Amino acid sequence: MHAWQTQVEDARARIDAVRERLCRLALGGTAVGTGVNAHPEFAQRAIARLAARTGLAFVGAPDRFAAMASQDTAVELSGCAPACAVALLKISNDLRWMNSGPLAGLAEISLPALQPGSSIMPGKVNPVIPEAVAMAATRVLGHDVAVSLAGASGNFQLNVMLPLIADTLQDSIALSPTLQLRLRSAQFPA
């Protein structure tokens, strides 16, 4: 179980490492982030107001052109999701194997019976929680492929696939309790 704990802690650390970059906004006042045709203090004031209203440590991206042209931070976050999903899938599979039995399986542990077992295998306990986690983890792995391809599909200073990236990341976050807990904490690092 210590190994499982370490896997989950490592997944949390990966997510924590990207949180600061998530607070960098590519706000410049125009489509390509130059600030041309916008008040010179627009970006700074807007970012400060967003930070004050949300309580998050939003800052201007150090290179607004790079932030507008790419979705590298979103792709990085999406990469944390499959690392977490792989760990949870492995743990789920371990639990399923350890629970297998009672007559011909490993029967090292006994998971609680949360739904009726099989009518042809008396005493069988379906490992429904590990099975649900395995399905969610598999879906998160598929989501990462979509985010990676969308992140690579930007052209010059714009990535038109940002809505796909955002929607897919939201789905992955909803499916991953570790991502939810780490990203929805009260404060991102300053």
Image: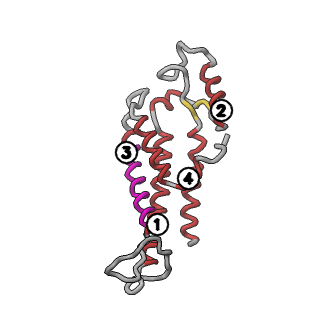
Q: Which residue is rendered at x = 38% and y = 29% of the image?
A: 155
Q: Which residue is mark 3?
A: 146
Dot 1: what SS? Answer: helix
Q: Amino acid at mark 4?
A: Arg
Residue 117 rendering spot, x and y as whole percentages: 39, 76
Vertical side of 174 occupied by 20: above or below: above
Dot 4: what SS? Answer: helix
Q: Which residue is mark 4?
A: 14
Distance of mark 4 from mark 1, alpha carbons?
A: 25 Å
Q: Which mark is residue 187?
A: none
In front of the other: label 3 or label 4?
3
Vertical side of 182 occupied by 154: above or below: above
**Residue 143 is covered by the magenta coloring:** yes
Q: Amino acid at mark 1?
A: Ile
Distance of mark 4 from mark 2, alpha carbons?
A: 27 Å
Q: Which mark is residue 129?
A: 1
Callout 4 environment at 10 Å: few (<14), some (14 to 19), or many (20+)?
many
Callout 2 environment at 10 Å: few (<14), some (14 to 19), or many (20+)?
few
- Mark sitting earlier along the chain (4/2): 4
Distance of mark 1 from mark 2, alpha carbons?
A: 38 Å
Distance of mark 3 from mark 2, alpha carbons?
A: 32 Å
What span is colored magenta in the figure?
Answer: 131-148
- Mark sitting earlier along the chain (1/3): 1
In-image side of 100 versus 177 (left or right): left
- Mark sitting earlier along the chain (4/1): 4
* Residue that sits furthest to the bottom in the current view: 103
Q: Amino acid at mark 3?
A: Ala
- Where on the picture, by quarter, is residue 62? top right
Q: Which residue is mark 2?
A: 53
Callout 1 environment at 10 Å: few (<14), some (14 to 19), or many (20+)?
some
